[in-house]
Image (cartoon, grey):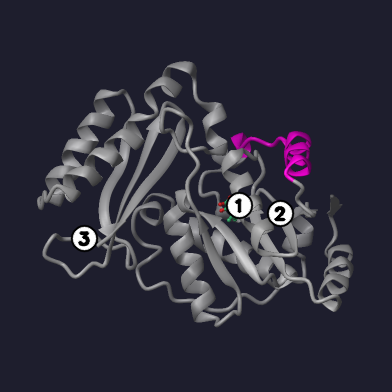
């Protein structure tokens, strides 16, 4: 496994790989890696000749400075894990490498409401930061395929829209959420849960699953299902921010009489000081 901190060195590696006709898969991360990230590496390795993972805690996507400060940083363990999974290249840029003083061009994008709802409503500016850094990383790496997790379903949809708007020839692959045996979605934030909240946290997956099941059984009152789920989450001691049955493509509130071809059920909740998100989707 090779690792690079500077773009210039990564470019040398990439031009050689391209000259040899090799395909490149790319998994962007903010470190604190876990089995969920390893599934991105695994899928990329299956589909590409070379796999690159970036580790960069992007300051521009944190609307809350305390959250940025508390974000776990575990580079030595991350490198061990990537090595064990035979990742080919790790890109570990510093802030000045990604955001040079001379700036860089970011195109105007119109996400048509995708960024206003759910995570976008509760974390103002978050997706502008995500789009900015992913655009920058794609510009540096120019991969054939980009690997992102279903757990951040809204993020995936926004990056999909970005690739579409810019007509970038990059295939975006959605990797399924990896879960702990009790259903809790793997997340870098889980390691900050207290033992008490860790025990209660699977309520998110349980309430998503119950909601999905109710829809499959024909329940049509989506707003009532959302209310029941929020109550269950509150009863478990977590503080829900939203529990939303949305259209899987527009991310707007879904209605049973609507024309949605896919529904996505998304949840965000505070487990003490830790904000967790999860989702399930259903193709109709
Ligand atoms: O999902 C993440 O970890 C981040 O939002 C990403 C895509 C690496 C951009 O910083």
- CB within 8 Å, label 1 to label 2: yes
Q: Is residue 39 visible?
A: yes
31 left or right of 2 in image: left
Residue at disc 1, secondary structure = helix
Estimate the x, y position of residue 152 in percent, counting from the top left: 47, 52
Say the numbered circle drawn on residue 40: 1
Disc nearest the viewer among 3 and 1: 1
Say the numbered circle drawn on residue 53: 2
- Say whether disc 3 or disc 1 marks the residue closer to the N-terminus: 1
Name the quarter where the C terminus is drawn: bottom left
Q: Magenta stretch?
A: 69-85
Estimate the x, y position of residue 259 in percent, counting from the top left: 19, 70
Which residue is identified by label 3? 254
Which residue is drawn at the image coordinates 83% and 64% (left, top)? 7
- Say whether disc 2 or disc 3 marks the residue closer to the N-terminus: 2
Badge 1: few (under 14), some or many (20 or more) residues near its Cα, within 10 Å?
A: many
């Amino acid at each position: 496994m090779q690792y690079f901190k500077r773009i210039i060195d990564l470019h040398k590696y990439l031009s050689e790989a391209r000259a040899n006709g090799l395909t490149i898969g790319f998994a962007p991360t903010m470190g604190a890696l876990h089995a969920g990230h390893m599934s991105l590496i695994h899928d990329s390795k299956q589909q590409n000749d070379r796999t690159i993972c970036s580790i960069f805690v992007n300051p521009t996507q944190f609307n809350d400075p305390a959250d940025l400060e508390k974000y776990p940083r575990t580079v030595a363990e991350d490198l061990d894990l990537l090595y064990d999974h035979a990742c080919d290249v790790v890109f570990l840029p510093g802030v000045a490498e990604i955001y040079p003083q001379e700036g860089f061009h970011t195109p105007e994008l119109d996400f048509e409401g995708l960024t206003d709802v759910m995570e976008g409503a509760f974390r103002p500016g978050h997706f502008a930061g995500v789009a900015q850094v992913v655009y920058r990383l794609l510009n540096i790496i120019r991969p054939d395929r980009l690997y992102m997790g279903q757990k951040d379903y809204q993020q995936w949809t926004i990056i999909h829209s970005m690739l579409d708007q810019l007509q970038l020839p990059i295939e975006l692959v959605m990797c399924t959420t990896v879960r702990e045996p009790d259903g809790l979605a793997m997340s870098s934030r889980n390691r900050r849960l207290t033992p008490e909240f860790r025990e209660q946290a699977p309520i998110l997956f349980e309430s998503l699953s119950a909601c999905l099941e109710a829809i499959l059984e024909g329940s049509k009152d989506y707003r009532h299902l959302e209310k029941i789920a929020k109550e269950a989450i509150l009863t478990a001691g977590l503080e829900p921010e939203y529990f939303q049955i949305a259209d899987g493509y527009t991310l707007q509130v879904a209605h049973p009489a609507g024309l949605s071809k896919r529904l996505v059920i998304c949840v965000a909740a505070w487990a003490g000081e830790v904000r967790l998100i999860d989702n399930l989707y259903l193709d109709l």
